[in-house]
Image: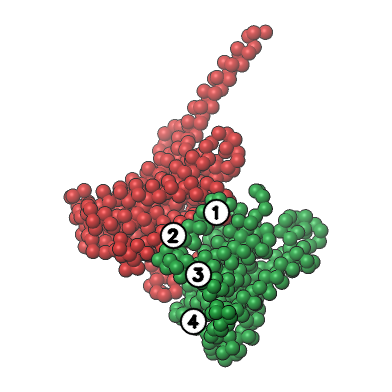
Chain colours: A red, B green
Amino acid sequence: MSVLPQETTVSASSSTAAAETRAAKLMKRRSRIRFYEIIVWIAAIAAYFLLPSKMLILTEIAILALFAVSLDLVLGFAGIVSLGHTAFFGLGAYVAGLMALHFIAEPVTGLIVAGITSGVLGLLTSFLILRGSDLTRLMTTLGIGLMMAEVANQMAWLTGGADGLSGFSPGPILGMFEFDLFGKVGYLYCVGVLFIGTMIMRRIAFSPFGLSLKAIKGNPMRSAMVAVPGRKRIVTAYTIAAVFAGMAGALLTQTTAFVSPDVLAFHRSADVLLVLVIGGTGYLYGGIFGAILFTLVKDWLSVITPQYWMFYIGLLLVILVLIGRDRLSRWVEYLPERFSKKEDR
Amino acid sequence: MLTILFDGIAYGMLLFILACGLTVTLGLMNFINLAHGAFAMAGGYVTVVMMNRYGISFYWCLPAAFIVSALIGLVLERTLYQWLYQASHLDQVLFSIGIVFMAIAATDYFMGGQQQLINLPPELSGRMDVFGVGIGRYRLFTIIICAVLAVALQLILSKTRFGSRLRAAVDDRRVAMGLGINVPLVFALTFAFGSGLAGLGGAMGAEILGLDPNFPLKFMIYFLIVVSVGGTSTVSGPFLAALLLGIADVAGKYYVPAIGPFVIYALMIVMLIVRPNGLFSRGGR
């Protein structure tokens, strides 16, 4: 009689161990480096050599990509529809501008300070999005974005108001690399930050932490029942996303040496949502692919109809939603998934 | 002081007429329609074109604005919106932002980007003194029209057969259909009616709120505030919320012009944190 329970304990513990190794393998497979990731970064480097005259638009793409990837962490993983993500972008842009104007012209310091400031704002405002439905979150994020725009507009003594902030020039990066006239150094700088940022967010998103975010997105109640601390996780994810959005804003300031109130405009929040829709949500690289396509389309449209490109952006949004935006990003699944041949099954 | 209060009430009444269509689509049909302001803008531009190009009387423009906006609403609902009632909120947001962008660019293309002005008929312009309080005639006119509309809306929603059908369709779509209610028709008519009211509001508001292609974006947040603060269970909730917002906005702009808009947004966020389901909602959900 006493043998039986002991046997079950043994088998239970062995099955737990088996489950653990299986889970570890699963996590490893999720986070494995995909084929297209290598392509993206090789292409980014190749563009530097192949398209020397297109540095400015490439820089723009890299900045928008970082911004979109940070939103993907909130939208694609945590499932929060935010219309005010540009608040962090704009704050980062202004902080970087003010740093360069009043304190240190060295860009990396400005970048880090901007990221921290935006992160603090993200942490403070993340508590506001914990309550209520999708609509409440939408309104709250939108309200925060509009409030930031209003603050920037009214505090003209600090931000330059409607005229924007100018009259500063970022110093050499780390005291070594001077920004050149053609934007080559600026491009490499932006791609470098994008690479590091994406890798950090990738590490976060494909960890058990990222998996728990997806669980919260799928069903908050059930994820709470398997002991996922939903509120804490959302606060953390939102803060991290704010940090990188702020860094994207800082990059824009440092490469253009100008901050306009436009960095906080509503259409930027809409643009970055569109970027994610084009690229697909929930796998981070959607932000990069989307940023490339979006910037090219916008550039092309603004050449054809300089004043009315907004119409076609709107049309694109409507069509995308009607045909189903999931279909668009499914092409990624057709790419060879495995890059390394390492046995991990 | 009383003049500011009066102007605030007129402004609030106008906001109510503009936003009450959204109360229904957003609150009752659970569709996040950020493009509501586009219908209001359509009504405003109908008025401008009719008055300034063809010299038609202002009084005829108002019903025309209602009808045109309602027709646009009906067509869009049947062709596009109806496919998205079951879609995720993100899809609805993206879709309606797309509509807003298209409306702004198209208006810019056809009408130009400048502020549009209308000339009110002489009996509506100017002020009169009532017991020492300066009252704009046009604002009085606005208040009367909007008050009548608000009462009519409340009666339609609570007393008529259509109102009860709508409430049934919203409460439980499947059961309502099972009872033989033509739910898509009810929704389409409601959507058209809401759009028409927005158009009417846009026409009447051209004088007070101003009218330019960016109208839908500029006032989007106001409509959303009215709906989310007022809650969606009654007509009186959004009505009171619109009045409060109107008075607060006018007073804020008059007394503390530097931080006026800031106060509104801050109040909204505080309100949403304290009462996520609206100021006047009954009980928690």
Q: Write the residue at 68% across / 61% down.
A: B234
Q: Is residue A74 above or below residue B130?
A: above
Q: What amino acid does circle 3 point to?
A: Val
**Label 1 in the same subunit as label 3:** yes
Tell me which label, 3 or 4, sits earlier in the chain.
4
Residue A288 seen from this side: no
Q: What amino acid does circle 2 point to?
A: Met
**Label 4 in the same subunit as label 2:** no
Instruction: Name the residue beneath numbered marker 2.
Output: A147
Q: Residues within 10 Å of mark 2 (few under 14, many from 20)?
A: many
| Residue B156 lies in quadrant | bottom right
Q: Residues within 10 Å of mark 1 (few under 14, many from 20)?
A: many
Cα distance, mark 1 to mark 3? 22 Å
Q: Write the residue at 30% across / 63% down.
A: A157
Cα distance, mark 4 to mark 2? 27 Å
Name the chain under label 4.
Answer: B
- Find residue B8 and report its horizontal and vertical position in percent: 54, 71
Instruction: Name the residue beneath numbered marker 1.
Output: B272
Comparing B128 with A321, the one in front is B128
Instruction: Name the residue beneath numbered marker 3.
Output: B250
Cα distance, mark 1 to mark 2? 15 Å
- Find residue B173 and report its horizontal and vertical position in percent: 73, 57
Tell me which label, 1 or 3, sits earlier in the chain.
3
Tell me which label, 1 or 4, sits earlier in the chain.
4
**Label 3 in the same subunit as label 2:** no
Q: What amino acid does circle 4 point to?
A: Gln
- Label 4 or label 2, whichever lies nearer to me, is 2
Q: Is residue B140 left or right of residue A101?
A: right
Cα distance, mark 3 to mark 4? 22 Å
Instruction: Name the residue beneath numbered marker 4.
Output: B116
Q: Residues within 10 Å of mark 3 (few under 14, many from 20)?
A: many
- Label 3 or label 2, whichever lies nearer to me, is 3
